[in-house]
Image: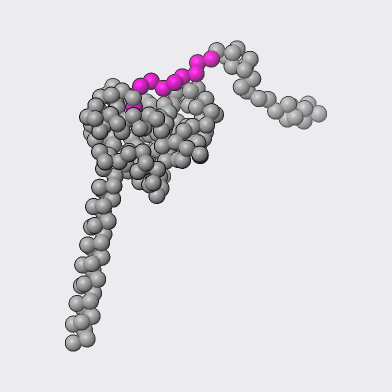
Amino acid sequence: MTIIIAILMAIFIVVVSRIVIYTNRKTRQRELNPYRINIQDIDRMEDGKGFEEYLYRLFIALGYEDAYKTVSSRDFGADLVFTDRDGDRVVIQAKRYALSNPVGLSAVQEIYSSMRFYRAKKSIVITSGKYTDACEKLAGYNGVKLLDREDLIEIITYLKNKQSGKAKDRIEAEPRLILDSWDDYLKQKAIKKDYKAEKRMMS
C-alpha cells in the first residue's frame, strides 16, 4: 500500500511539474509577443536574454524569414543574424540598457569583430537606451549602425501599425559614417601619442 501511494505521489509531482513548465513557457511566449510589447515592457525585462529573444521574434514578425538567434555562449559578439532586402548578411548585438547607463565602446568592438566569423557585410547594435559619444564615434569610423531607444520605439510602432516596410527602412538605412581625411584626423589630435614612452626609448 505504501509503495502504491509513493508511486502515485511521484506521478502527481511529475504531472504538476510538467503543467508548471508548460504554463511558464506559454506565459513567456505571450510576454515576448512583438505585437503586444512596448518599450516599458522591454525596460521591465529581467535580463538581456529576454531582449535578444524578443528582437528575434520582432525580426521574424517583420518578415525576415531567415533571421536566427545565436547561442548564448560562444556567440562571438553577435546575438542575431539576418539577411536584409539587398541579400546582405547582417549581425546584431542587442543591449537592453537603462537610459542612465549608455552603451559603450565594447559593443561596437564586439559586433564589428564578429562580422568575419559570420561572413556578414553589415553590423548593427540595437539598444533600449542610448550610446556614449565615444561609442558613436567608433561606430561612425567603422560603419557600424547604431539603433537607439527612439529608433526601437519607432520600429515597434511601425510593426504594430502593419508598416513593416518602414520598419525595415529604419533598420536597413545606411549607418552614419565619419569620413575625415588623414590630415583632418591628425589636426583633431584623435591619435594621442605617449610622449613619456618616446622619452624612455630615447634615453
* Residue 163 lies in the magenta stretch: no
Q: Which segment did they paint magenta? A: 171-180
Q: Is residue 151 left or right of residue 160?
A: right
Query: What is the basis of the colouring in this image?
Result: one colour
Q: Residue at x 38, y 47 (%)?
A: 45
* Quadrant position of the C terminus in the picture: top right
Say whether residue 163 is visible.
yes
Say whether residue 66 is visible.
no
Classified by dominant secondary structure, the portion drawn in magenta counts as: loop
Q: Residue at x 25, y 47 (%)?
A: 30
The percent coordinates of residue 68 (x first, y second) are: 29, 38
Tell how many labels. Answer: 0
The percent coordinates of residue 75 (x first, y second) are: 40, 42
Q: Is residue 95 above or below residue 22?
A: above
Q: Residue at x 36, y 38 (%)?
A: 39
Q: Is residue 104 left or right of residue 42?
A: right
* Residue 178 lies in the magenta stretch: yes
Which of the 4 quarters of the picture holds residue 202?
top right
The percent coordinates of residue 184 (x first, y second) are: 59, 13
Q: Residue at x 51, y 39 (%)?
A: 101
- Residue at the extreme right of the image, as rendered: 203
* Quadrant position of the N terminus in the picture: bottom left
Q: Is residue 18 above or below residue 108?
A: below
- Residue at the extreme bottom of the image, as rendered: 1
Q: Is residue 178 left or right of residue 29?
A: right
The percent coordinates of residue 185 (x first, y second) are: 59, 16
Q: Is residue 6 above or below residue 190?
A: below
Q: Is residue 42 above or below residue 203?
A: below
Q: Which residue occupies the foreground of this view, 154 or 146?
A: 154
